[in-house]
Amino acid sequence: MVMTDVERTAAPSEGADLLSTVQQQFDEAADLLDLPARLRGILRVPQRELTVNFPVKRDDGRIEVFQGFRVQHNLARGPTKGGIRYHPAVTLDETRALAMLMTWKCALAGLPYGGAKGAVIVDPKQLSIGEIERLTRRFATEISVVIGPERDIPAPDIGTNPQVMAWIMDTISMHQGYTVPAVVTGKPINIGGSEGRLEATGRGLTYVLTAASQHLGLNIADVRLAIQGCGNVGSTVAREAAALGMKVIAISDSRGGVYNPHGLDVEAVLTHKAHTGSVAGVANADLITNDELLEIECEVLVPAALSGVITAQNADRIKAQIIAEAANGPTTKAADAILYDRGCLVIPDILANAGGVTVSYFEWVQGLQEFFWSEREVNAQLRRVITNALQQVLRVAAERQVDLRTAAYMLAVQRVADAVTTRGIYP
Ligand code: NAD
């Protein structure tokens, strides 16, 4: 089985760093919104956190205990939604941060959800398919007390995929005694997945990018893209952007990148990666490092791999006019300030990569109604939702003279705060 191929090993402090960054971004938006202290107290921390330790039978007969989490940040706007990550370096703090980001992402896109995230501390590459299935079914059982179509709806993330979602859906369905398709999204199409879900994040990013390029007066045919990461999102962005007439001049994976200033043959690169496991070595391209890729001459940079890659150390050497954040948290706070001063338009993760959760929402709606849409309908609705969100963010950014990230947070935080206020504090 092909698991998503992120190969990083995060430093142990990474989760805590990400949580403090996400909380700082929240504090900044809360200050600008003059949010009352009682609302800040509610929104700054997750509403629910579940830690589970559970045994899994290994193929050699050993029993190994794994630790996993499910964090629900806020339920004021509806059930919570967010991915499940399998990675050896995940932490509870990282899961908290990612759950909080999901709350803002859903609110910004106008989806009737709060944010959640789940994780298991495991390197799926070290397990057989059978072991991954047993781990998944037991983890699903452990978190079944908090998930469900009306409560919290998981989706794939790093290290998990549609097959893993199918096992979760099947496990929950076995417990219920009937099929519960809407308990997860990102399922295979033959059991209730949505057309266009697999490509949704990359496609949504490309829709946002097109609208942002037009906003800056860039001619699409003149747009050169550099993409860090050639997984699900990076490869879809490359394909979609090339189809629109943009030039993909660089793309990379964990083993390095390839560069051609006149434009890469995207299909040739993706075929080469599919055959060899890496983009490196494709014809008609020079090899570059992942660091060099970030700094090449281009109009658009798409970090689609790791968090924390654009920092105060390299921000002033980045030449792109637009950075569209496919990865979660690729730009540090210090880098944000440098890029803003230099006039670089940073489209924040909670907007740029919201296509995935948006089509997950469509999948959930289709599952609840047992009525399925064509890919064309999915894409049209995705374009509507995500470009609408971009226009709102651009408007707030212009009105308040802030960067797009701050504007996006202001819009999202206000919406969640309004929901909490309107519902009132129980009891
Ligand atoms: P993926 O696993 O399919 O691909 C990740 C890519 O990053 C791979 O090409 C991998 O080789 C590359 N990579 C790993 N380590 C690297 C390194 N050190 N330097 C350069 N490249 C490296 O993952 P994906 O689904 O494409 O997700 C990419 C990013 O987008 C992640 O940060 C993810 O959280 C975020 N994201 C994904 C989705 C989605 O729907 N897939 C939605 C929202 C956000």
Image (cartoon, grey):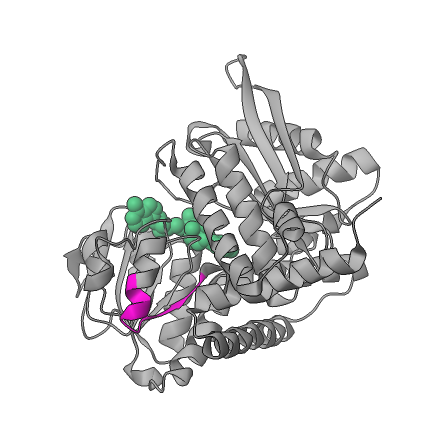
In this rendered view, identify the residue nearer to me: 320 or 305. Answer: 320
Question: Which residue, as the protein is rendered here, is positioned at the far top?
Answer: 62
Q: Is residue 299 magenta?
A: no
Q: Is residue 229 visible?
A: no
Residue at 74% in and 38% down: 172
Residue 215 x %, y %:
42, 83
Q: Is residue 29 left or right of residue 303?
A: right
In this rendered view, identify the residue nearer to me: 98 or 35. Answer: 35
Residue 413 x %, y %:
60, 60
Q: Is residue 198 left or right of residue 335?
A: right
Residue at 70% in and 55% down: 192
Residue 212 x %, y %:
42, 78
Residue 251 x %, y %:
28, 60
Q: Is residue 340 magenta?
A: yes
Does residue 36 sit above or below 12 in this rendering?
Answer: below
Question: Which residue, as the protein is rendered here, is positioned at the far left?
Answer: 286
In this rendered view, identify the residue nearer to me: 393 or 84. Answer: 393
- Tell me the quarter of the image containing the C terminus: top right
Q: Which residues are magenta?
A: 338-348
Image quadrant assignment for residue 338: bottom left
Residue at 42% in and 28% down: 126
Q: Is residue 158 left or right of residue 106?
A: left
Q: How many marks?
A: 0
